[in-house]
Amino acid sequence: MDIRVGDILQMKKKHPCGSDEWEVLRIGADFKLKCVGCGRLVMVARSKSEKNIKKIISQENK
């Protein structure tokens, strides 16, 4: 997958706030993601987050 910092990821499951979109802040063995809905920051293992991605919305499209 071609994921870059600044991309918005639409996940299969929703966050408790109701949003299913996350902004990528850091990439490595883990992803640092920020919830678009409430602003919560989380660190998720790359392997786990790549399985849960439904769609990648790149910043170039906006």
Image (spheres, helix red, strand yellow):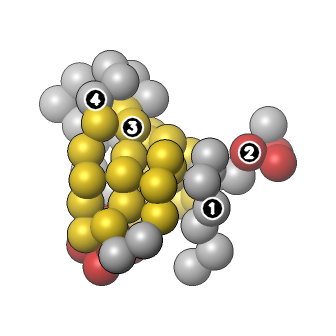
Q: CA distance from mark 4 to mark 1?
A: 19 Å
Q: Are marks 1 and 2 in contact (CB under 8 Å)?
A: yes
Image quadrant holding the N terminus, namely bottom right
**Mark 4 lies on residue:** 40
The answer to whether 14 appears left or right of 62 in the picture is: left
Return the residue nearer the eye: 56 or 32: 32
Q: Residues within 10 Å of mark 1 (few under 14, many from 20)?
A: some
Q: Residues within 10 Å of mark 3 (few under 14, many from 20)?
A: many
Mark 2: amino acid: Gln
Residue 56: give x, y in percent of width and height.
Answer: 59, 58
Q: CA distance from mark 3 to mark 4?
A: 6 Å
Q: Earlier in the sequence, mark 2 or mark 3?
A: 3
Q: Which label sits on residue 59?
A: 2
**Mark 1 lies on residue:** 4
Q: Which label sits on residue 34?
A: 3
Q: How many marks?
A: 4
Q: Earlier in the sequence, mark 1 or mark 2?
A: 1
Q: Residue at x 25, y 60 (%)?
A: 44
Residue 41: give x, y in percent of width and height.
Answer: 29, 36
Q: Which label sits on residue 25?
A: none
Name the element at disc 1.
Answer: loop
Q: Earlier in the sequence, mark 3 or mark 4?
A: 3
Q: CA distance from mark 2 to mark 3?
A: 15 Å
Q: Residues within 10 Å of mark 2 (few under 14, many from 20)?
A: few
Q: Earlier in the sequence, mark 4 or mark 1?
A: 1
Mark 4: amino acid: Arg
Residue 1's place in the image compared with 12, above or below, is below
Residue 46's place in the image compared with 22, above or below, is below
Q: CA distance from mark 3 to mark 1?
A: 14 Å
Q: Are marks 3 and 4 in contact (CB under 8 Å)?
A: yes
Q: Residues within 10 Å of mark 4 (few under 14, many from 20)?
A: few
Q: CA distance from mark 1 to mark 2?
A: 9 Å
